[in-house]
Amino acid sequence: MKKDIPNSAAILIKKIVEKCGEKHVDWAVNFEASFANTLTTTVKPQNDGTTFVLTGDIPAMWLRDSTAQVRPYLVLAKHDKEIEEMISGLVKRQFKYINLDPYANAFNECDNGFGHQSDDTEMNGWIWERKYEVDSLCYPVQLAYLLYKNTGSESHFDEDFKEGIIKILNVFSLEQDHHSSSYRFQRTTTRKEDTLVNEGKGTDVNPTGMTWSGFRPSDDACQYGYLIPSNMFAVVILGYIEEIFTIIIPNSEIATKAKKLKMEINQGILDYGCIKNKEGQTIYAYEVDGLGGTLLQDDSNVPSLLSAPYLGYCTFDDPIYLATRKTILSKENPYFYEGLYAKGIGSSHTPKDYVWPIAIAMEGLTTNDKLEKEKILDLLVATDAGTHFMHEGFDVNNPNNYTREWFSWANMMFCELVMDYFDIRVMK
């Protein structure tokens, strides 16, 4: 599936290579490999004008991953019609999928029946996996909004988009009281993270104003139903929806519902989503259930607590965020690992002592300290096992041990951090 990259991408790669100079040749090598790789190996234009984006070594498209995979290309889209149309086509395909089933997280290129068809949930041939994750509905809205902000394009705000937004609002609203939901998910597996307990309904929750999520952005089951980072992301994209349906395609009913949900979810975060760390400081919990259950940790996937300012929920210097950041980048977070070659945040999705380049890159994207960004980029290229690509996770004591040879999302997070270091950023 390899093909030539657009001229604008080649020009940006050349620009980055020049900026890296002799001091950061290794950054340049990895940037060129990763920035080109996503375009040449994962982006598949469809006959209907939409765009299918493979996650990498799995032949399916995740709503979340596909957004993150193309996000850095938004800096090119304003002056490159081909890139703009590719991203617009992706938004259109994402919303076709959402309209097909807003509870599914990953889809097939066609109605081929690939994926986890034996799962006990409402599957069909288009769906690769039907793990309900709040962030899977947030990411396509984010991409649609950022495409508009960076290019002025409105062509993707079509009837499918409007229908999908209505579905998203309805699901978020329904899942504020999960007891009213018909969604169930069970998988026959020995891996408990891949299925929901309580006959597929998940652990018990009490309404908080937040919206329930069955799974995390790692595709692992939530321990408690209210995933704080995903609810933060929901607050942000509900603001986008309110703006879109107030200014661009006026619809007072949609705008009003989005505003109401945004306020309720945010109040739920404030009322139920804060806990104390061991020093007695107020920080954000990772998950809560509204019944007193709370989880102090963070996960390497985005949305994460670490990524809150990157997503637009708060500022870099917000006191609660800073206290949270310090806590989750320490041993108080059970998924923070430190070894001979690296330290960072891992996940229950990968082995103990494996840290994720996505989370390491996010450390750099959530600080204004250039020296810290430089150290992080040096670490990322030094731990790529000689492949010049990022992986899902790697062993802090031996980076030659890693998961996923081909993981486009991680590659593009590295690229975004390199661009950020040189003050090239997506307009938010």
Image: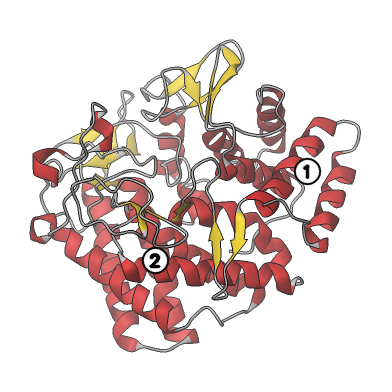
Which of the 4 image quarters holds residue 249?
Answer: bottom left
Q: Is residue 78 visible?
A: no
What's the residue at 61%, 38% (across, down)? 364
Closer to the eye: label 1 or 2: 2
Report whether 171 appears left or right of 36.
Answer: left
> Is 47 in front, or is 107?
47
Q: Is residue 325 visible?
A: yes
Which of the 4 image quarters holds residue 293?
Answer: top left
The amino acid on which the numbered mark 2 sits, given as a three-letter code, is: Tyr
Question: CA–CA distance between discs 1 and 2?
Answer: 31 Å
Give the number of the disc on residue 45.
none
Quarter containing the C terminus = bottom right
Which of the 4 image quarters holds residue 219?
Answer: top left
**On the image, numbered disc 2 is attached to which residue?**
97
> Is 251 in front, or is 41?
41
Q: Residue furthest front?
A: 112
Report whether 305 appears left or right of 220.
Answer: right
Is residue 90 depicted above or below 314 in this figure?
below
Residue 310 place in picture, x, y as percent: 52, 50
Secondary element type, mark 1:
helix
Give the number of the disc on residue 32.
1
